[in-house]
Each structure stands twice: as C-alpha cells, then as structure tokens.
Amino acid sequence: MLHSKRAWTDEQMNRIISVLLRSGVVAAALVVLAGGIFYLIRYGATLPDYGVFRGEPAKLRSVSGILTDALSFHTRGVIQFGLLLLVATPVARVAFSIIAFALQRDLTYAIVTVIVLAVLLYSLAGGGL
Amino acid sequence: MTILELTIFIWLGSLVAGFLGSLTGLGGGVVIVPLLALVFGVDIRYAIGASLVSVIATSSGAAAAYVKEGFSNIRIGMFLEMATTLGAFAGAALAARISTASISVIFGIVLIYSAYLSSRTQRDRLSDKPPDALATRLRMDASYPTPEGPKTYHVYAIPGGFSLMFMAGGLSGLLGIGSGAVKVIGMDQIMRIPFKVSTTTSNFMIGVTAAASAGIYLNRGYIDPGLAMPVMLGVLVGSLLGARILVGAKTRLLRIIFGGVILVLGIEMIFNGLTGRL
C-alpha cells in the first residue's frame, strides 16, 4: 500500500498524477455532456446570440454561484459545474504534488508548488491585478 | 440557425480541429478562436473563454498518458509553472483592458508564427557542456525512455527558459490558447531539453497555465456554458482520436496543410482586427 511507506517514489507519484488527471477530465466531460443534453432539449430550438458580448449572469461567474445553480439543476449551471470540475483538475494535481514533495522531504519543490497553488487559488477566488 | 444546429456545427468543427491538432502536434486550441470568431460570428471574448476550457481538457487528458510513460519531467514542469501561471494571470488581466481588435491582431501574429514553426523540422538540440549548477541543485537532470533504453539528459539556461515561460503564459492568458509552441521553444532550444521531453512536459504545464487564467475569465463572464460545451467535448473527442492514429501515421503532408490553414486564419484575424470587424 502506498501510504504504508514514508515517501513516494517519482514513479508512484507519476502514476497517481496520471489517474488524477484522467478521472478529472472524464468526470468533467460526463457532467458537461449530461448538462448539455438537457440544455439542448430545453433551449435547442431557441436562437443563439453569441455575436454580442454581454457576459454571463453573476450566478455563473463565481464558484459559489455555480454550485448553487447546479444544485438547483439549472442546465446551464450543470454545464458550468462540469467546466469548473475541469478547471479544478490541474489545481488538484498541484495540490497533490505539494503533499508528494513534502513526503519526499523535497522542501524546494514543496515551496515551488505552494506558490503555483497560491496563484491558481487567487485567480479562482476572483482576485484581480 | 437554432442553438441545436449551431451546437452540432461547432461540435463538429471542434472535433476536426482537435483531431488535426493532435495528429500534427500543433494543438487544436490555436484554431478554435478563429473558427468561432470568423466562421460562426461569435464574440472573440466568448470564443477565448470556450477555447481556454477546451485547452485544459486536451492537455490534462494527454498529460495523463505521458506522465505515466515517464516522458514528462515533473520537476521542470512544476518549476516553470511558477512563470507560466503568473504570466497567464497577467495575460488574462490584460485581455480585459485592451480592445478586441488588438487581441485579434496579436492572435493573427501568433497564428502566423505557429504556421512558420510547423514548417520546420524537429530535432533534439542537446548540449554536451558540463552540467549546469542551478539545474543540478534543482534536481532537473533526468532520463527518458527511448527505443534503446533510458537516456539521460542535462538541463541548462534556467533563467532564460523561465523568462520565456512567463511570456508563453501571458499569451495563453491573453488569447485563450495553450501556447505549447512557445513553451517547447523555451525548453528544447533554450534549456536544451530533448524534444520529446519538451513537448510532453509542455503539455503537462498547459492545463495548470490555462487554469490560472480560467478563474479570471470565469469571473469576467467570458465562459458561456452553452458555447463551451460543444467546443470542449468536440476538441476532447477529436484529440483522443488523433492520438490513437498518431502512432505510425505519416503526418508530414497533414502538417503542411494544417500549417497553411493556420496561416490563412492568421492573416484573416489581422485583417479583421485592423478593419474593426472583430
């Protein structure tokens, strides 16, 4: 078992990262597909309007708003939640790498990875320049 | 055209883009924005948002395979991600401050440059200089699988590569593309990393780079679920199919054709930007 050892080798780390990335993409694609089917059933016959930029409504712009909208089973909210899962996949990979580097007692790379995670979370939380 | 019809056309277009992008190694993301903006008349901000999301899907999907096979160098990737994520964050912030016409023109220049790159041959530019002190300290030197067994390589010029990665991230955040081509140049030409390791590590970094600007795009309302859905699903399926066929396929002619398409799209993006149509 992996957790019975004190540290992961680079190969084990690669394998876990690989599984993490693949499951994230598959889960995101399935949620987007499911939301997409219901979205097309509901709005498929209406006319699109992507030529004019209005920006998404506030509820589809923030992590908390998307979660609320998806839980109310609004089709666009469900798709947006799937897209959020997709964005979260590389973020989860970075978070996992921090733990892996820390277990390897690789302080330099643990710090490097914390910096990358901080930038990602700051961006997702809506921070600007 | 109704939403259903448009969704099907965009899905098919994205499928072909993803398929050709992965078959030729040029990436599908770079043609998604011109496809949506020029062919389907989508506002370039929505196009960039949808493209960025599809870039995360394909890069994470492909990275899963490369990481397992031991091609990607995770230490190099993590280290350079500091530069690409900060660059992407800055690029996405800049995207909201400059006009869509300027974005089109910059996009066109990047497309033309990608077309030029696709015409060049790929070969390793390894160096036999003594190992670099910083690379040794950062434990970046490693080995990768080849038909003749594992082959070791050394990494050089980390500051130079790091600076170029900041630029690559900036372009990614500004234009909603993976900017894999610039990342590969930074690694194989400046840092002297073997081509196969450069491309797979670049792929590994693209998802994280794009995630850094996705947050900003999301908060600005650039990511429309109805539009991003067919783009993401199309590019993902297309690139998976392309990767299946890639093994042993003769892609030289395809690269030339796809490079030509990219060149034409680049000229059109610049023209439409300058005449104020985008």
Image (cartoon, coloured by chain):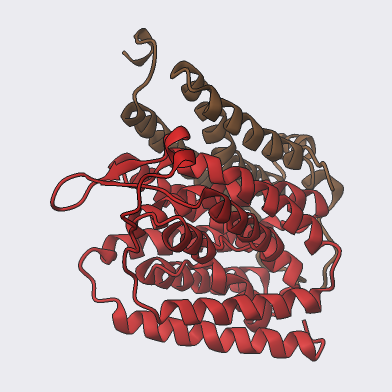
| Coordinates of residue B159 in the picture (x, y in percent) | 57, 50
Which residue is at a point 34% across and 56% down the rendered structure image?
Answer: B194
| Coordinates of residue A113 in the picture (x, y in percent) | 58, 32
| Coordinates of residue B181 in the picture (x, y in percent) | 50, 66
Farthest residue to the top: give it: A4
Which residue is at a point 34% across and 76% down the rendered structure image?
Answer: B121
User: Left of B243 or right of it: where is A115?
Assistant: right
Q: Closer to the camera, B192 or B86? A: B192
User: Left of A58 or right of it: where is A17?
Assistant: left
Q: Is residue B81 above or below residue B237?
A: above
Q: Quadrant of the C terminus of chain B?
A: bottom right
Q: Is residue B66 above or below residue A14?
A: below
Task: Tell me which chain appears red.
Answer: B
Which residue is at a point 33% across and 27% down the rendered structure image?
Answer: A12
Q: Closer to the camera, A75 or A85? A: A85
Which residue is at a point 78% across and 77% down the rendered structure image?
Answer: B102
Whether residue B254 is visible here, answered yes or no, is: yes
Q: Colour of chain A?
A: brown
Q: How many discs mark residues in the rendered view?
A: 0
Farthest residue to the front: give it: B130
Whether residue A47 is visible here, answered yes or no, is: no
Q: Closer to the camera, B212 or B131? A: B131
Residue B246 found in image quarter: bottom left
| Coordinates of residue B213 in the picture (x, y in percent) | 69, 51
Farthest residue to the left: give it: B148
Q: Is residue B247 above or below residue B75?
A: below
